[in-house]
Amino acid sequence: MTKLTLGIETSCDETGVAVTSGRRVLSNVVTSSLHLHKKYGGVVPEIASRYHVEYIVEVVKEALKAAGKNISDIELVAVTNGPGLVGALLTGISFAKALSYGRRIPVIGVNHVLAHLYSAFLNEGEVPRFPFVGLVVSGGHTALFHCKDVDRKSLLGQTQDDAVGEAYDKVAKILGLGYPGGPIVERTARMSNGSSGINFPKSYLGKDSLDFSFSGIKTAVLYYVRESPVKSVPDVCHAFQEAVLDVLVEKTIAACARTKSASVVVGGGVAANKRLRSKLIEAGSFNGFKVFFPEFRYCLDNGAMIGVMGGELYKRGHRSDLHLNAEPNLKA
Ligand code: KG4
Ligand code: ZN
């Protein structure tokens, strides 16, 4: 039942295509329009869409070549159908449907947010087993899930405003550090010894809530920087990072306790953050859960996670058809 799958990801600024077979990644090619968005301090949807249109055929060809396969070998096409930027999504979906129609192979739509959790299934060595608590931390999403199978999960909590990666990006912008902010803020925070005494507010949204809110801390950073201009940027980055990561870690501990889970799977761009990794691993050893992270190359948007999740959904009988459409606000 394992199908040679072409996984296609075009929900934001990465054009990602992979050839997968079960959990095996035969190739994973990603190109990004990131450099074109830098001067705007965020992704410009029109530019992202045009970039996908221009590069998707080339990226598919490269992925096939790197896998040593021909287009006629592909048995299933999996594509992100949401959430994301509508024009960007439509590029990948249109390509996938044309391929499905032309080659008479099945097509399957994949939820981008959930697919981030399947990046950790690409690891060599030990991979997660169901059930687990899934923590998605990216530029567009922050959510906790209880995952019982690829197609059986419940949402435990999600952000009510900004995503955590978005908060990193906005704080970097306030501090004039550049875009995307996550990696720069993490690097800059490392230059602080953490003894500045700066405390930014941690938002918990009530004692039992597993939802998140990160817009308040972003505003707190803005006011703090505005009020007295002479500041140590590393100390501000450090205080911001500790506050947001503490909330993520504490809510993950609570999610494990509530669902009696012994495994946590983390996915999304912020999963690349080394400080988050060490804090979660420490919390896991203290609270009795094991934490699985994707390899760094699979943290950001990529076609491999789409191919793997699409293949697993297909095995469980899920199918899409040529009515598959972009769903910018697709719920997980
Ligand atoms: O998963 P992703 O590629 O895109 C979405 O699906 O949203 O994640 C991109 C986000 C950006 O906000 C970026 O700043 C953040 O991930 N990010 C990080 C790190 N690397 C990327 N945030 C914190 N620390 C990092 N090391
Ligand atoms: Zn993503």
Image (tube, grey):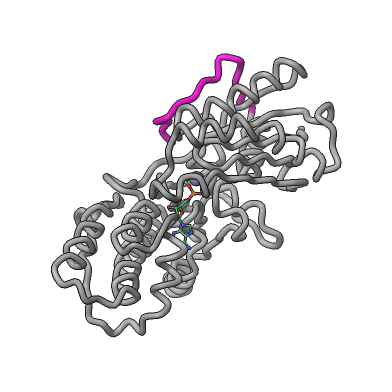
Which of the pair 133/331 is nearer the observer? 331
- Is 257 a magenta residue? no
Which of the pair 288/21 is nearer the observer? 21
Q: Position of residue 221 (x, y in %)?
A: 23, 63
User: Is residue 100 shown left or right of residue 190?
Assistant: right
- Residue placed at 22% from the left, 81% from the top? 197
Name the dominant secondary structure of the magenta segment.
loop
Which of the pair 16/77 is nearer the observer? 16
| Quadrant in the picture for the N terminus | top right
Number of numbered discs overlaid on the protein picture = 0
- Residue placed at 52% from the left, 61% from the top? 272
For residue 307, what is the image quadrant? top right
User: Is residue 157 shown left or right of residue 179?
Assistant: left
Q: Is residue 158 above or below residue 50?
A: below
- Is 327 a magenta residue? yes
Q: Is residue 31 above or below residue 74?
A: below
Q: Position of residue 192 (x, y in %)?
A: 36, 81
Q: Is residue 39 above or below residue 11?
A: below
Q: Which residues are magenta?
A: 317-332
Q: Position of residue 41 (x, y in %)?
A: 38, 50
For residue 18, what is the image quadrant? top right
